[in-house]
Image: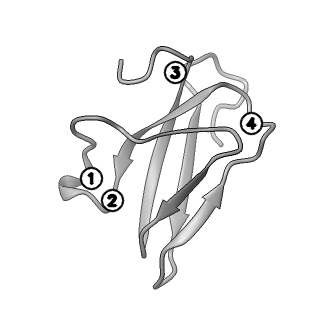
Amino acid sequence: QFGNDARDGQRFLLLVNGAPDAVDFRLKDDLPGDVWVSILETGLPRGAVRGEPATIEAGQTVTLEPRTLVLFQHAARGMEGN
């Protein structure tokens, strides 16, 4: 997590999978904030998230494909996609 003491929209979460197989990441239940929105995914063309971004909340699990990374940005509940 980067910028943990920053306000909403200025905190980031970087998940990296350097393995040759998909890996599940489970976010800790005590992460601050409500919703994390994907803004960069290296498994997508050009890495750009277009359309509906993936979102994850504390305690949920996200699967990263082999040798990819996903950058999430914190968003207050109800602000996803803005």
Q: Amino acid at mark 1?
A: Gly
Residue at position x 52%, y 21% in the image:
9
Element on which disc 3 rests? loop
Q: CA distance from mark 1 to mark 2?
A: 4 Å
Q: Is residue 65 left or right of residue 1?
A: left
Q: Is residue 21 above or below residue 4?
A: below
Q: Are marks 1 and 3 in contact (CB under 8 Å)?
A: no
Q: Which residue is mark 1?
A: 47
Q: Is residue 66 left or right of residue 33?
A: left
Q: Dot 2: within a 10 Å radius of its alpha carbon, few (fewer than 14), some, or many (20 or more) residues?
A: some
Q: Position of residue 63 (x, y in %)?
A: 50, 62
Q: Which mark is residue 42?
A: 2
Q: Which residue is mark 4?
A: 31
Mark with earlier residue (1, 3): 3
Q: Dot 4: within a 10 Å radius of its alpha carbon, few (fewer than 14), some, or many (20 or more) residues?
A: few
Q: Which residue is mark 3?
A: 9
Mark with earlier residue (2, 4): 4
Q: CA distance from mark 2 to mark 4?
A: 24 Å
Q: Nearer the viewer, mark 4 or mark 3?
A: 4
Q: Amino acid at mark 3?
A: Gly
Q: Are marks 1 and 2 in contact (CB under 8 Å)?
A: yes
Element on which disc 1 rests? helix
Mark with earlier residue (3, 2): 3
Q: Position of residue 18 (x, y in %)?
A: 50, 76
